[in-house]
Amino acid sequence: MDVCEVEFMAEKELVTVIPNFSLDKVYLIGGDLGPFNPGLPVEVPLWLAINLKQRQKCRIVPPVWMDVEKLEAIRDEERREATFTPMPSPHYMEVTKLLLNHASDNIPKADEIRTLVKDTWDTRIAKLRLSADSFVREQEAHAKLDNLTLMEINTIGTFLTESLNHMYKLRTNLQAPEEGQSQDY
């Protein structure tokens, strides 16, 4: 899966917007949205929130987890734990990036939030690299990937699958009977 595909999937996450226009309910394949009334919050997919924001038709309300204190707690817990901790959103990195790129004026302490999410990401990727290194070094056959997001899996996925393929080839070559030996006993 490509990074763009992961981001595309993240754009389906629901966020709250406060529109400055009126519009009846909109019927889409993915579900009904609205009605839109000025000043009244409504949940819409992230892609629509960004589109409305770019056209100056709404204000985006940041997700509840996009708060400096909550993100500091998440970062600190991630640093303390040896395993991966659950994230507040399965697409926390992509949602943060998109919201901060397109609606940073609607997000209090946007720079601090950007730094905290990046710190959390860096911690998780470092853990992932150490886990992958240990996985390959110990020649494991399977791994448990609890609490990883799709973007994190995407980051390490190619390396892990290629490592498994190489390990399989090495194992099958080691187990192949030597030439000249009979397989009959």
Image: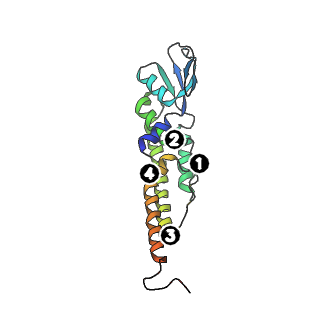
**Residue occupying the point 49% across, 53% down:** 124
Q: Which amino acid is tagged 1?
A: Pro
Left or right: residue 74 versus residue 126 is right
Residue 95, image x and y in percent? 48, 37
The span from disc 2 to disc 1 (Cα, nearest Å) is 12 Å
Q: Which amino acid is tagged 2?
A: His
* Residue pointed to by mark 3: 139
Q: Which is in the foreground here, disc 3 or disc 4?
A: 3
Nearer to us in this view, 86 or 78: 86
Residue density around tag 3, few if under 14, some if 14–19, many if 20 or more, within 10 Å: some
Q: Which is in the foreground here, disc 3 or disc 2?
A: 3
Which numbered circle lies on residue 91? Answer: 2
Question: Who comes first in sequence, dot 4 or dot 2?
Answer: 2
* Residue pointed to by mark 1: 86
Q: Which amino acid is tagged 3?
A: Gln
Q: Which secondary structure, mark 2?
A: loop
